Image (cartoon, rainbow, N blue to C red):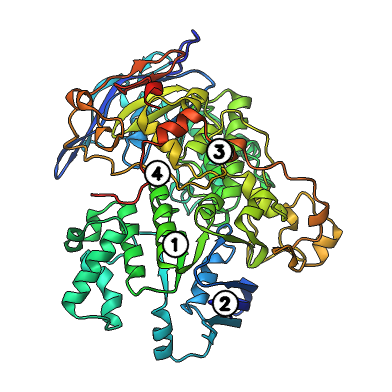
Amino acid sequence: MSVDTTPALLQVEGLAVEFATRDGVVPAISHASFTLRPGGCLGLVGESGSGKSVTALAIMGLLAKPAARITAGRILLDGVDLLALPPEEMRALRGGAVAMIFQEPMSSLNPAFTVGDQIAEAVRAHARVGAREARARAIELLRQVRIPGAERRFDEYPHRLSGGMRQRVMIAMALAGNPRLLIADEPTTALDVTVQAQIVELLRAIQAEHGTAILLISHNLGLVASLADEIAVMYAGRLVEQGPAARILGHPEHPYTVGLLGAVPRAAPGDAPLTGIEGMVPDLRSPPPGCVFGPRCPFCVATCRAAEPALRGMGAGHASACLRAPLDALA
Amino acid sequence: MSPLLEVTGLRKHFSLGGFFRRGEVRAVDGVSFAIEAGETLGLVGESGCGKSTLGRLILRLVEPSAGNVRFRGQELAGLSAAAMVAQRRDMQLVFQDPFASLNPAMTVRDIIAEPLEVHRIDTTPGIDRRVAILLTRVGLRPDHARRYPHEFSGGQRQRIGIARALALEPLLLVCDEPVSALDVSVQAQILNLLRDVQREAGLAMLFISHDLMAVRQVASRVAVMYLGRLVETAPTAALFATPRHPYARALLDAVPAPEVERRPRIVLEGDPPNPMDPPPGCHFHPRCPFATERCRAEAPALEVEDGHAVACHHWRWLPPWPGLSPALTEPMAPRLARLLGHFRPIEETSA
C-alpha cells in the first residue's frame, strides 16, 4: 500500500475468515489484504459487524475455534506466516512482538490481583527476570503510560482506578513484551471525551518513543484521523478503500467512505442535517450480488450488481473497490 | 408565561452507607435552569458529573434532596403517585442502551402500545393504528410491530424506544445518551430523527450526552455540567463560538476531527474527579490550566452576560480560544459535498 520500499512489518494477504453458526456459515472476512510498515499507524475503520475486530483477532491467533475458521490467506509478521506457526511459538509472540488492547479495560483486567502484579506477570511472561526486577520494570511501565504516583499505583486493585487509568494499565501490560506491533481495538470508545484525547496522545507518544507500529481499529473516522497515517475502510467483511490518511479523508474514492465522512457531526455554517447512509449492513450469509455496498449506494448501476469489484489502484498508494471510481465525474 | 420546565436549586445527595465511613455523594449540587415549550436544551458532561441523575430527578424517578422542579407551573415534589402518573404522561424518557431498555419478551407492538394502554388512551384497534403510525414516523415499517427486539439492529431498537416515548404525545422528552451506544453513521440517523420529531411535534427536549458534537445537532441551548454543578449555559452557537469556561473549551478541544492537518491541542490532564471527594472551591481547579489561589478557595457563581452564563472567576481574562478544528468548522470540500448530495438525508430506514 505505501509507496516506500521498507519491508512491511505486518502483511495480511487475501485473508478470509468464516464462522460456523446455527444458521449456517457466515463469511466474516473475504480476501482482505493490507500492510503496515514498521513504526507506522494503520487505521482500520468500519461499523459493527464489518469484520474489523475479527481481523485483529485473526492476527493475534485468538479466533474462537472451531467456530471460526481461516479459509484462505497469509498473515506475515516480518515475513513469517503467523498462520503456519506452531501454537507455542504463537503464544510467545502474543504479548511479545504483538500485543493488543481492547475497548473495555475493566473486563480485561483480573479484579483479584493488583495492577502491578498483573503488569509484572506480563513482564515475566516474556523475560527471564526475578520478582524484584519485574516489579521495577512494571513501575517503569506505569511511568511510561503517564500514571502519576506509579509506585503507589502498583499495589492498587483495578476497581480503584478510573476507566482512563485502567486503559493506561492495559497499555502498560501490552508494552511489557516490547511489542513491535500494537493492536488497539476501539481503545477509547468506553472512555470520557477528555480522557479519550489523553489516550490518543499516549498512543502517539508510544509510537514515537518506541517505534511501535499501531493497528488502530475504530468506527470513528475522527479518532482514526488523529493517529493513523494510512487508513483502510472495511465494509461487510471486505476492504473497500485504502490509502494515505490525507487522501482517504480529503479525496475518498469509495461511496461508503463518502457516507461515513458525511455522518461525522460538524460545526459548519448552514447547519444541514447529517448525511447518513440508508439501510443496513447486509446479512453476510446471503450478500447482495455484485458490490456488497450496492443496495445502499446512490451511485449503483447495473454493472455494479453483475460482479463484485476488486480493489483498484487510484494512484499514490490509494485503492478503491468501486467500479465507478474515480468518483469525480459523479460529483 | 412560565417556562415548560423550571428547575431551581435542585440537589441530590446520595448518602453512602457504613457505620464508620459515612459520606455522601453530591450527584446534583444546586442546579437551576429552564426549558421553554418546544425548546431543546443539551446537557453535556462526562461520566459521574450527575447529568443522568439530573434527568431522573426531573421525571421524579429519584427524589430530590432539595430544590424544585416545576412542570407547566406545577411543582412536582410532593405530588401523589396518581398525580405524578398523570404528569408523566407529558414527560417521557429515551434511554441510552437500546439493548437493555426494551423487554425482549414483548413484541414491538406491545412495547410501543404499553404506555397507551397504561393511560387507557384508545381501543385496541385504535392503539394498533397508532402503533403503525408511530413506527412509520420513526422510520420503521408497520409490519415490524409483530417482531421482537432481538430481530433489530441497535439503531432500529433506538427507533422503537423513541416511538414508545412519542406514543403519548409528550410535551417534554428527556433523552439520556440516546446515541452513544451506536455506530457513527447510525448516530447520524437517530440525531436527524430526533431533530425532526422535535420540530414536527413542537415538543421540548432535554438531550443528555457526553458528546458536544451530537448535542450541537439537536440543541438550541447547551448547559455544561461538571461534578454536580452547571459551569456554563449558552445558546449553542455562542458556546461553540466563544466557550467561556476552561472545561467547555477542553471538551471542544477533545472532539476528534477527521482532519488531514493535525493541529496542536490542549489535552486536559487528569481524570474527572471523584464525586465522593470533590475538590474545594471551583471543582475544576485541579485540572484547570488557569487556576489560581482564589479558584482553590472560592466556588465561582454563575455569572450571566448576553444570555451566556459561566461559573469561572477568570473567564474575562482567559486567552482567546483558538476554535474547533477547521475540519469541523469550514465548509466541506466541494467534491465531497457534491458527492454527499447524492445521499439523501436519512429519514426512513427499512429493515
Query: Which is nearer the N-term, disc 4 or disc 1?
Result: 4
Rounded to the nearest whole Å, what is the CA distance between mark 2 and mark 4?
35 Å
What x and y, as percent, mark residue B349?
29, 49
Query: Which is nearer the N-term, disc 3 or disc 4?
Result: 4
Q: Which residue is mark 4?
A: B185
Taking A319 as reference, is B289 above or below it? below
Q: Which residue is mark 3?
A: B257
A135 sits to left or right of A4: right
Q: What type is the residue that disc 4 sits on? A: Ser
Q: Quadrant of residue B19?
A: bottom right
User: Are the residues under marks 2 and 1 on the same chain?
Assistant: yes
User: Are the residues under marks 2 and 4 on the same chain?
Assistant: yes
| Label drawn at residue B3 | 2
What x and y, as percent, mark residue B199?
44, 62
Query: Which is nearer the N-term, disc 2 or disc 4?
Result: 2
What x and y, as percent, mark residue A71?
21, 25
Rounded to the nearest whole Å, what is the CA distance between mark 3 and mark 2?
36 Å
B206 sits to left or right of B190: right
Q: Which residue is mark 1?
A: B199
* Rendered residue at 51%/76% (across/down): B58
* Rendered residue at 80%/54% (across/down): B291
Rounded to the nearest whole Å, what is the CA distance between mark 3 and mark 1?
28 Å
Q: Quadrant of residue A133?
A: top right
Question: Can residue B346 be seen in the rendering of this structure?
Answer: yes
Q: Quadrant of the N terminus of chain B?
A: bottom right
Look at the numbered discs 4 and 1 and tell me whether their residues touch, using CB distance below 8 Å.
no
Look at the numbered discs 3 and 4 and tell me whether their residues touch, using CB distance below 8 Å.
no
Q: What type is the residue that disc 1 sits on? A: Arg
* Tag in front: 3 or 1: 1
* Tag in front: 4 or 1: 1
Taking A247 as reference, is A145 above or below it? below
